[in-house]
Amino acid sequence: MSGLSDIRYIKRSEIDTARWDLSIEQSRNSLIYGYSFYLDLMSRNWDALILGNYEYIMPLTWNKKWGVKYLYQPPFTQQLGIFSAQSITQDIMHSFLDILQKEFKFAEIFLNYDNGSSSSLVPKNNFTLSLSCDYQSLVSGYRKDLIKNLRHAANYTMNYVRHFDLAKAMSAFKKTYSQRTPHISPEDFQHFGDVCLYMQNDVIVRAVTDENNHVLATALLLMKNNRLYLLQSTTLPRGREIEANHFLLDQVIREFSGSNRILDFEGSDIDGIAHFYMNFGSVNQPYYFYKYNRLSWPWSIFKK
């Protein structure tokens, strides 16, 4: 590998896509968000920092406003940052981040769980659950609150639907949570739909319905390598009353138990949601928020 001074800024058009994806595939911190297809479909633009023969790579998702290029985090892309099959040291982190500040005046991005080697990073919650054990072993890790809620759910007729319509699940999520996610545009939803079409054989859509076939809750997961990503989880009003979301995720865990996969709940720093995910016996695998503002006045004031 070359020295840290040899980190190169490479435009998307110059990236060897096959080599890039192989590097993501072989990384110790491999994540679906780093693959070229995901970046191509979800980000407005992206380039990269590359060290050595794609031994350390960092996608740079950027946009331009008022003639200024800045780094941003695309929707449905929880964490990016540096990927490598080798150890990502503090020196490597600092070298990559220093180059970012030279190339871009402003950044609000999220780095991955293996990028926590700098004091300038703010940890964010992400809960994961290993599904390598059998179902009964996983249930033994459930917290009392969850057991209570599952008993409550058992008082109602609920059907676990293993092959639910993707478009209906996405529509339910958009309709239910659009006011909470104003930063996600209709185009962003369309782009995520394109990701799902690209990954059609690895898209998992599950739902819970009542005795009248009314939808109570849905879950949309993407499967890549050994990880299941819960990208969209929706609970309808009636489903919330009868704990349908608890029942749904319990059934997902039952279905994939013993599969040697990891269920990635995708968050959260909201206390109630974090508590909900922890109830399943998950562990926190934090990722990291990184922000800086080197814009000149008056643009720096606007971005505050």
Image (cartoon, helix red, strand yellow):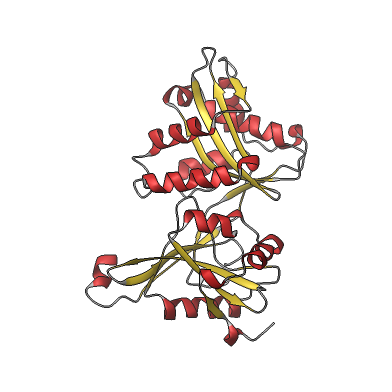
The location of residue 299, given as percent across then percent down, is 25, 71
The location of residue 280, given as percent across then percent down, is 62, 38
Vertical order, 155 against 226 (above or below)? above
Q: Is residue 105 left or right of residue 233?
A: left
The location of residue 215, given as percent across then percent down, is 50, 22
Where is the C terminus found, in terms of image quarters? Answer: bottom left
Vertical order, 149 against 267 (above or below)? above
Where is the N terminus found, in terms of image quarters? Answer: bottom right
Vertical order, 10 against 75 (above or below)? below
Q: Is residue 76 left or right of residue 83?
A: left
> Can residue 247 be seen in this snapshot?
yes
> Can residue 304 be seen in this snapshot?
no
The residue drawn where x is 49% and y is 33% is: 167
The location of residue 150, given as percent across then percent down, is 59, 25
User: Which residue sits furthest left?
Assistant: 298
Vertical order, 213 against 97 (above or below)? above
